[in-house]
Image (cartoon, coloured by chain):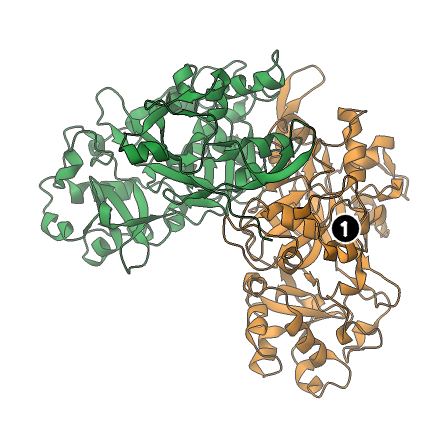
Chain colours: A orange, B green
Amino acid sequence: MTPDATHDPALTSWVASAQAPGCDFPIQNLPHGVFSTAGGAPRGGVAIGDMILDVGAALRLGLLRGEAAEAAAAPSLNGLMALGRAAGLRRQVSALLATHSPAEAHAAALLVPMAEARMHLPTTVANFSDFMASIDHCARLGVRRDPKNPLPQAFRHLPVAYHSRASSVRVSGEAVVRPHGQWPREDGSVRFSPSEAMDFELELAVWIAGENALGTPVTMEQAPGRIFGVGLLNDWSARDIQRWEMPPLGPFLAKSLSTTVSPWVVTMEALAPFARPAPAIEPPPLPHLDSGWNRAHGALGIRMQALIVTPRMRAEGAAPAVLTDTDFAHLYWTCAQMVAHHGSNGCNLLPGDLLGSGTASGPEDSARACLAEILLTGPVTLPNGETRNYLLDGDEVIFRARAEAPGATPIGFGECRAEIAPAIAWPA
Amino acid sequence: MTPDATHDPALTSWVASAQAPGCDFPIQNLPHGVFSTAGGAPRGGVAIGDMILDVGAALRLGLLRGEAAEAAAAPSLNGLMALGRAAGLRRQVSALLATHSPAEAHAAALLVPMAEARMHLPTTVANFSDFMASIDHCARLGVRRDPKNPLPQAFRHLPVAYHSRASSVRVSGEAVVRPHGQWPREDGSVRFSPSEAMDFELELAVWIAGENALGTPVTMEQAPGRIFGVGLLNDWSARDIQRWEMPPLGPFLAKSLSTTVSPWVVTMEALAPFARPAPAIEPPPLPHLDSGWNRAHGALGIRMQALIVTPRMRAEGAAPAVLTDTDFAHLYWTCAQMVAHHGSNGCNLLPGDLLGSGTASGPEDSARACLAEILLTGPVTLPNGETRNYLLDGDEVIFRARAEAPGATPIGFGECRAEIAPAIAWPA
């Protein structure tokens, strides 16, 4: 994962929008996704500027070749991720889209404007596991449980995680219906009604490459090769339901109501320039969660933001308001450590499986990456004077992120967004 | 779900072994499964006596017909479960296999001896959720945490559950590799090594029929129709790993090491004669977890046993020794309540999804359905004088179950069995 010619900041694309200032998808990025256009079936694409390269069409014209390109053209990317990391395909796509590519005229006809495309889930998610890798998130919320020992007992020894729900993972843009649930009220009665504490959690989505047989663990040496790429993930949480149901088996209905992911999978190849040393932790990780590679390159510098648009802001034409401004590099555990921990018992991780990093909070107050943390200091006041505790119907939460590093072309992630839809009328 | 002619104790089959005393699969049962024979692909079958009816072969001869039969012939039963409950197909198969069936001669040629078949997972398990519905299990194990309040805070208000791991669900017969994991030792050091506390949990497997769209809850009126059938499930648990990793997000690697299910899905139609009133609970269930049907028919009388064969017993040719003898009717929450709770937040349950009931312990000491409970009173002494704390390598755990009720032909579940294989040598 050493930066190469595909990362050269001097590299440009014949797709003009890829050079636009602040563009998420310059030629140094080239994330994979699944899209469709009116009347068409879902198929694989690569983002470039404000366009999508139709991978299958490029294959048919002979502009791309090989089994990775064939898998990247499919209606879900599980097959691509089954092949492992995608460095070779990246080099092909980069050459095709680079300025002075001899194939520009042919390839230009295969571009689909993002504005005309509908995005789909990148994979058929067979398994979704969610971690809790931010020490700032845990420490802030743990104080309520035990001021002297706010961290979970194992937090400094392993990346704490739980199995979450695969069937309710949805792609950016699909509304989230406010769930019904039960919890105790101040008078001690336990009642069932729509949640009154809808929250977001700003996380990184980690997409798994390759497969290990059940019973065969994943080592730290193997872990980097088991991460195809990353995106953004909103681990929607109904806090009232969660606090009641959680002891001792963990969150259940508070999380399975819906999980939103961004449609573009930014490959680990694209992120090579943004690798950083893993944080030094105490106690040091046990050998099965440690490696020289991880110490040198395990962390990722990715600036992540959560924004909100309320119905009134929408009516006023106001810009989204920033709720959270954090960096993924704050996390205590790295993605490689999450994967190695997950596989350390021999659990089989499948291609296209999804991991959530957990709420990516940082130490600053501005880096609190969910409302449960933000509200510890009182309600949020938005630029138009509105206030918020938990989310109200019609509120839309938007995640954005950019990887930045000295000497590298910044790359973005696109958006992960969804609006809270009102609870249904309970069936009579 | 009223018993009909297919449940008549006077009904017999032309398959002689179906009438053998103690047979799990008389004509009143007719469970569905997926099997293969040497060199053949997996395909759907129905158990009768010690034989399997090849459903696809019966379709091709015109002995069965319709979309349910076609779905029941497939290499996984997700399609059958997508059609909902299978009452119509049951009547067809019952007529075909009944004594004096005019098609006996043709159908007899389509029977495959179980002894020559390999069984497969009944469905492609997209989601697996595990409940904790036994008050006896919770109360016994909770005493260690809090002697005055041994039950989880929400236990009497909802069936507590967690999302578990789908990828590591395996069919009866596949060995379970002892997992590596980390936990603190008496000297305070946290180390990583093979688990020293391998346990079984005797549970019912609940297989989901039909599908609700994300955001559309499952009501108690719909819940019985969302259960295709049941089997046996061993929720293998590494207790040392579990105690360390569990707070606050629940069990993770302690469970994802492997889960074993029995291959035959006993339909809710077959279980009609064994329905019982749900237990009266206090406080009474909230309306969304209550129904007249559930109060009258929600519980199931199923005697369930866990047995062990140690390597020494195997060498001595000893019969399996009973560790647990319990009844599913002891459970505090019914299967319909589990399904309605799971869907109450709008979580979409998919056809072929798997629920575990949680350890099906009862109030008697003999009805403790996992070693963690049994060992509360000291090590187990087996009939040959061997003792056990947690499971040792080579130990095989076998689950068996029978539904019995006055005036009904008893039906069985076949076996759910697996042996503990030694931990691997950790990769250098």
Q: Which residue is mark 1?
A: A398
| Left or right for A74, reference A260 | left
Image quadrant assignment for residue A150? top right
In the rendered image, residue B31, in percent from the top left (x then y), is placed at 29, 40
Residue A140 versus residue A341: which sits nearer the camera? A341
Q: Position of residue B43 (x, y in %)?
A: 31, 54
Circle 1 chain: A
Q: In the image, B238: left or right of B261?
A: right
Residue B279 in sight from this viewpoint: yes
Foreground residue among A306 and A36: A306
User: Which element type, helix, strand or loop, lies under badge 1?
Assistant: strand
Mark 1: give few (<14), some (14-19) or many (20+) Cα within 10 Å: many
The quarter holding residue B383 reads: top left
Say whether residue A53 is visible. Answer: no
Name, please, the residue furthest toward the bottom: A102
Please name the amino acid that badge 1 sits on: Ile
Q: Is residue A375 left or right of residue B27?
A: right
B78 relative to B255, above or below: below
Q: Residue at x 51, y 37 (%)?
A: B129
| Residue B105 horizontal/vertical position (percent) | 9, 50
